Image (cartoon, rainbow, N blue to C red):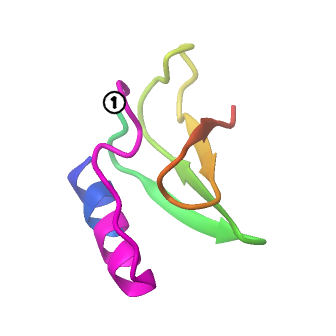
Amino acid sequence: MKSFLFLVAVVSAVQGRQFFNPVIDNQDVPDPGVIKVNGVYYVVTTTNDANGNKFAIHFSNDLQNWAPGG
């Protein structure tokens, strides 16, 4: 989780925008891997999401508002 928060801080500083943590509320999102494809950010984590999916995927257009992706 700490590495994900660090990544968000770095990206937000580069883009001149301010974000507030946690960016994904009420979920355990350790060991994040983030990529950007066609303007959309995707994060994959090494834990179960709220629905019990392993390696939960979330997506976002702004690195602040995340939606489950499967």
Res 27 → quadrant: top left
Q: Amino acid at mark 1?
A: Asp
Q: Which residue appears at 28% of the width and 57% of the height?
A: 5
Q: Position of residue 22 (x, y in %)?
A: 30, 43
Q: Which residue appears at 36% of the width and 64% of the height?
A: 8
Q: Which residues are magenta?
A: 8-27
Q: Is residue 62 above or below residue 16?
A: above
Q: Residue furthest right?
A: 38
Q: Is residue 57 above or below residue 34?
A: above
Indicate the quadrant containing the C terminus: top left, top right, bottom left or bottom right.
top right
Q: Position of residue 25 (x, y in %)?
A: 37, 32
Which residue in the structure is indicated by mark 1?
Answer: 28
Q: Which residue appears at 50% of the width and 59% of the height?
A: 63
Q: Is residue 51 magenta?
A: no
Q: Residue furthest left?
A: 2
- Assign a secondary structure to mark 1: loop
Q: Position of residue 13 (x, y in %)?
A: 33, 80
- Residue 21 located left or right of residue 59: left
The 10 Å Cα crowd at callout 1, few under 14, some 14 to 19, many 20 or more, is some
Q: Main secondary structure of the magenta part?
A: loop
